[in-house]
Amino acid sequence: DSGVTQTPKHLITATGQRVTLRCSPRSGDLSVYWYQQSLDQGLQFLIQYYNGEERAKGNILERFSAQQFPDLHSELNLSSLELGDSALYFCASGRTPQTGELFFGEGSRLTVL
Amino acid sequence: ILNVEQSPQSLHVQEGDSTNFTCSFPSSNFYALHWYRWETAKSPEALFVMTLNGDEKKKGRISATLNTKEGYSYLYIKGSQPEDSATYLCALQHMEYGNKLVFGAGTILRVKS
């Protein structure tokens, strides 16, 4: 158990809909990272937050947004969903703003029909 | 675009065999190289974070080496056991890209008893 909690574990929705994925980092970790793994692709970095502020941004679509709340949990919002957004979305946490050893959650599997 | 390549894509070995796989990456502006172990239906788990050329790290039967000048890292597993079956991911942390980890596609290891 990494100590990182992600909900929901599975989500099935339709195109055009909006979903929110939630992540609670490991106790004491201030950094939260979101990664996407689509079929036949490696883990793709989406975005990082540190202590409530956006720290680094990857190839995150404009339809996607994220935030980190004062209690350090983070949410990834995916809107106007398309079939290609079906993927496994991982959250990871770390102690510092600089990426070191990351602790991953078990992921949220999103299926868009 | 940074390209992190892992080979082989998959590997099937017998219990007791020793094995190794490769992670290749651009050698310029290197910052750190991470290895993760990802078992099916679980979250990726950090094995090593390596920063120095010539670094060697070991955790039980698993060890890794790093050559930043030529841009590669090897992961070795001595005396493979069925519980070593997993996908092994390497990820590059590159100075130009800050905190973003660029993951390779992984090497899938299956150990038969």
Image (cartoon, coloured by chain):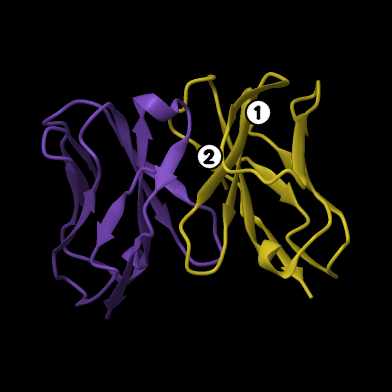
Chain colours: A yellow, B purple
Q: Residue furthest right?
A: A17
> Can the viewer see residue A22?
no
In percent of width and height, residue A12 lies at: 81, 69
User: In this rendering, do the residues under marks 2 and 1 share a single chain?
Assistant: yes
Q: Which residue is mark 1?
A: A27
Among the 4 quarters of the image, the one containing residue A95: top right
Is A97 positioned to the left or the right of B22 in the image? right
| Residue, disc 2 | A103
Q: Amino acid at mark 2?
A: Phe
Residue B63 coordinates in the image, percent (x, y): 20, 46
Identify whether B81 is placed above or below B78.
below
Image quadrant containing the C terminus of chain B: bottom left
Using the image, determine if residue A82 lies above or below residue A58: below
In the image, is residue B14 above or below residue A31? below
Q: Nearer the viewer, residue A27 or B88?
A: B88
- Residue B53 shows in this picture: yes
Residue that appears at 78% across and 56% down = A8
Q: Residues within 10 Å of mark 1 (few under 14, many from 20)?
A: few
Q: Quadrant of residue A93?
A: top right
Mark 2, secondary structure of its residue = strand
